[in-house]
Image (cartoon, helix red, strand yellow):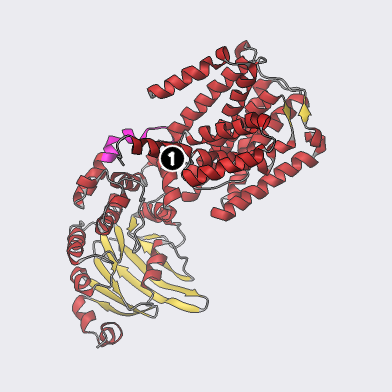
C-alpha cells in the first residue's frame, strides 16, 4: 500500500474524533456509494459494458435482508448471507439475459430488468409494503459490537469498503482481470486467442452484482428503512455518473465520483435549492475539462505540471 | 498422421449470393499453402469459415483430425489453430509485452485466476520477451502498441500467433500495407516458423506469396478452380485468365 493511501486511511479512521455526527453519517453514505460505484465500475470501466440497472442489486439485497428480518424473524447472521446469495443468483440470471447483447442492447436490457425489479418493489405490496417501504429494521452487532451509534457504524463501513476495494484491486490486476480488459478492448481477438468472452463477462457481471448486494446491505443497515425508489433508474444513473465523473476503469475513480455525487446531493442541497441543476453543471464541466474523469484527468495534469513526462 | 486442415464441401451464401461453393481442400501437417483469387473470390469468407467466425450452410472443417465445424472460436484455438488479421487487431493501449502475455495466457488454466498478481508472473513476461526477440521487437517490449509503426504492429500480430504454438496458422494478408523493406522482414519471419506449424495464407502480393507457397489454391466466385504446386497453378490457363489477366 502506498504511503498516501495509508495516510488517507489514517485520516478516515480518525474522522469521527474531529467531526460532528452529520459528517460521520455523510462519510458512511459516501463509502457505501463508493462500494456501489466501484462494483458498477467492474462492468463499465473494466468490461466496457455500460449498465443502467445496477440499483436492482442494491435494492434486492436490502429488501431481502429486511423482509427476512421483519417477516421471518431471522437474525442478521442469516439474513445477510441469504440476501447476498439470493441477489448474486439474481445477478447470474440477469447477466445471462443481458449479455445476449452488448453496447446499447446491453444497456437497454439492464434497464428493462431493473424496471421489472423496481415495479415489483412498488406493486408487490404483500412483500415489499409498496410505497410505504419496510421500516423498523435494526443494525447488526458483529462480535457483540453495537453499531447503533454513528461512529461505530462508520468504522464498520470503512472496514468493509477497504476490504472491497482491496479485493477489486486484486481482481483487476489478476490474470482474469487482464483478460477482462482484453474482452473490453478486442473481443474478437480474445476469442481467437482461446478466451470465452461471454463467460468472462458473465462472471464479472455476477461478481459486480455480489458487490452491489454488499452495498445494499450496508445501505439498509444505515437507513434502517428501505423504499422502492432505491431501485429506480435514478439511483443506477447516479452511480453511472459517479463512475464516469471519477474515471471509469480506474480504482480510485468511482470512489472520488461517489464522494462528489453524495456531497452534491447531501451537502450542496442544503445551500442550493436546485442542486440537481448544480450537479448537471458540475458533470458537464468535468466532461469538458477532464473527459476521462477526475482521477485520470488530475493524474495527467500533475504529470504535465511535473515536467511534461508522458 | 492427420492433415493439419481438411475442408469438405464447404458452402456459404449471403442473401442468396453464394460466396463459398462446395470448397474442399486438404492441407498436410507442416505444409505452406497459399490461397489466391481476385477480389470477391471468397478468400476471406473461407478464412472466416475455417476460423469459426462465420457458420457454414453445409460442409465440415477438420483441424488435426478433430471436427471443429460446430466448435466455437475459442475451442478451435485450443485444438491448435491460430490466426492473424488483415486489419490489425491488437490491444493498442497495452505494451507489446502485455499483448504477447495475453496470447500466452489464453491457453493456460492461469487465465481463470482472479487472485494472483499477473505482473509478478515473470515466467510469462520472460516468454513474451523471447517471442518479441524472435520478431525483432524485444527492445520495444515496454512500448505501447499505439507507439510503434504499422510494420512493427504486423510483427506483433505474428508474435501473438506464435505464442499460441499453433499447429495450423492462418495468415490473412500479412504483407498488406507494408513497405518493401517491411515485407522482407515479415517474409523472413514467416520463413523461420518451424515445420511443426502448417501455414495457410491469403495474399495479394504475388511476388512474395508465390515464393512462400508449396501448394496453391485458386478461388473464383467462391469456387475452387485450380489447386496444385506453383508451376501447375501459374501455368494453368484458368489461373492466367481469371487471376493473372493473360
Considering the image in quadrants, where does the C terminus of chain A appear? Answer: top left
From the image, tell me which residue sits under label 1. A297
Residue B238 % position (x, y) = 28, 86
Asked whether residue A278 is drawn in magenta, I would say no
Q: Secondary structure at mark 1?
A: helix
Which is nearer the eye, A162 or A284?
Answer: A284
Q: Is residue B28 above or below residue A130?
A: below
Q: Which subunit holds the residue at mark 1?
A: A
Residue A272, how many percent across, how many down?
66, 34
Q: Left or right: B43 with respect to B190?
A: right
Residue at the spot x=57%, y=55% of the render? A104
Of the pair A12 and B208, the residue shown nearer to us: A12
Query: Which residue appears at 64% of the width and 33% of the height?
Result: A265
In which image quadrant can residue A211 be found? top right
Left/right of residue A126 with respect to residue B69 in the rendered view: right
**Magenta span covers which residues?**
B112-125
In this figure, what is the number of numbered marks? 1
Amino acid at each position: 500500500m502506498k504511503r498516501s493511501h495509508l495516510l488517507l486511511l489514517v485520516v478516515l479512521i480518525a474522522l469521527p474524533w474531529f467531526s460532528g455526527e452529520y459528517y460521520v453519517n455523510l462519510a458512511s453514505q459516501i463509502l457505501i456509494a463508493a462500494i456501489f460505484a466501484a462494483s458498477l465500475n467492474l462492468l463499465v470501466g473494466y468490461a466496457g459494458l455500460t449498465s443502467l440497472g445496477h440499483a436492482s442489486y442494491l435494492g434486492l439485497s436490502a429488501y431481502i435482508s429486511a423482509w427476512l428480518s421483519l417477516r421471518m424473524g431471522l437474525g442478521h447472521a442469516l439474513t445477510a448471507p441469504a440476501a447476498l446469495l439470493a441477489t448474486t443468483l439474481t445477478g447470474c440470471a440477469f447477466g445471462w439475459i443481458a449479455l445476449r447483447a452488448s453496447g446499447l442492447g446491453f444497456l437497454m436490457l439492464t434497464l428493462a430488468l431493473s424496471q421489472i425489479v423496481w415495479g415489483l418493489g412498488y406493486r408487490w405490496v404483500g412483500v415489499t409494503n409498496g410505497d410505504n417501504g419496510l421500516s423498523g429494521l435494526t443494525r447488526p452487532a458483529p462480535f457483540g459490537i453495537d453499531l447503533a451509534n454513528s461512529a461505530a457504524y462508520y468504522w464498520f463501513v470503512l472496514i468493509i469498503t477497504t476490504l472491497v476495494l482491496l479485493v477489486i484491486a486484486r481482481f483487476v490486476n489478476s490474470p482474469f482481470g487482464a483478460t477482462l480488459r482484453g474482452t473490453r478492448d478486442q473481443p474478437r481477438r480474445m476469442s481467437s486467442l482461446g478466451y470465452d468472452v461471454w463467460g468472462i463477462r458473465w462472471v464479472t457481471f455476477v461478481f459486480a452484482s455480489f458487490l452491489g448486494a454488499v452495498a445494499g446491505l450496508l445501505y439498509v443497515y444505515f437507513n434502517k428503512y428501505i423504499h422502492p425508489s432505491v431501485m429506480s433508474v435514478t439511483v443506477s444513473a447516479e452511480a453511472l455518473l459517479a463512475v464516469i465523473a471519477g474515471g471509469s476503469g480506474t480504482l480510485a475513480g468511482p470512489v472520488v465520483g461517489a464522494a462528489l455525487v453524495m456531497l452534491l446531493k447531501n451537502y450542496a442541497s442544503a445551500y442550493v435549492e436546485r442542486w440537481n441543476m448544480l450537479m448537471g453543471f458540475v458533470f458537464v464541466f468535468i466532461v469538458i475539462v477532464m473527459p476521462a474523469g477526475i482521477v485520470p484527468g488530475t493524474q495527467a495534469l500533475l504529470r504535465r505540471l511535473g515536467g511534461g513526462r508522458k | 498422421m492427420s492433415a493439419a486442415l481438411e475442408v469438405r464441401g464447404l458452402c456459404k451464401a449471403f442473401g442468396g449470393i453464394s460466396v463459398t461453393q462446395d470448397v474442399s481442400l486438404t492441407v498436410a501437417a507442416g505444409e505452406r499453402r497459399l490461397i489466391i483469387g481476385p477480389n470477391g473470390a471468397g478468400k476471406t469468407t473461407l478464412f472466416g469459415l475455417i476460423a469459426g467466425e462465420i457458420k457454414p450452410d453445409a460442409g465440415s472443417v477438420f483441424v488435426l483430425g478433430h471436427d471443429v465445424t460446430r466448435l466455437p472460436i475459442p475451442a478451435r484455438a485450443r485444438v491448435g489453430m491460430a490466426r492473424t488479421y488483415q486489419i490489425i487487431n491488437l490491444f493498442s493501449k497495452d505494451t507489446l509485452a502485455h499483448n504477447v502475455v495475453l496470447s500466452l495466457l489464453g491457453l493456460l488454466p492461469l487465465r481463470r485466476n482472479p487472485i494472483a498478481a499477473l505482473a509478478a508472473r515473470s515466467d510469462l513476461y520472460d516468454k513474451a520477451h523471447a517471442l518479441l526477440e524472435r520478431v525483432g521487437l524485444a527492445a520495444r517490449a515496454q512500448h505501447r502498441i499505439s507507439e510503434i509503426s504499422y510494420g512493427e504492429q504486423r510483427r506483433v500480430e505474428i508474435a501473438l500467433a506464435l505464442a499460441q504454438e499453433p499447429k495450423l496458422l492462418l495468415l490473412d494478408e500479412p504483407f498488406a500495407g507494408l513497405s518493401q523493406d517491411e515485407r522482407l522482414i515479415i517474409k523472413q519471419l514467416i520463413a523461420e516458423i518451424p515445420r511443426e506449424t502448417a501455414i495457410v495464407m491469403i495474399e495479394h502480393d504475388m511476388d512474395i506469396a508465390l515464393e512462400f507457397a508449396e501448394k496453391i489454391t485458386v478461388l473464383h466466385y467462391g469456387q475452387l478452380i485450380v489447386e496444385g504446386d506453383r508451376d501447375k497453378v501459374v501455368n494453368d490457363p484458368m489461373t492466367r485468365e481469371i487471376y493473372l489477366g493473360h
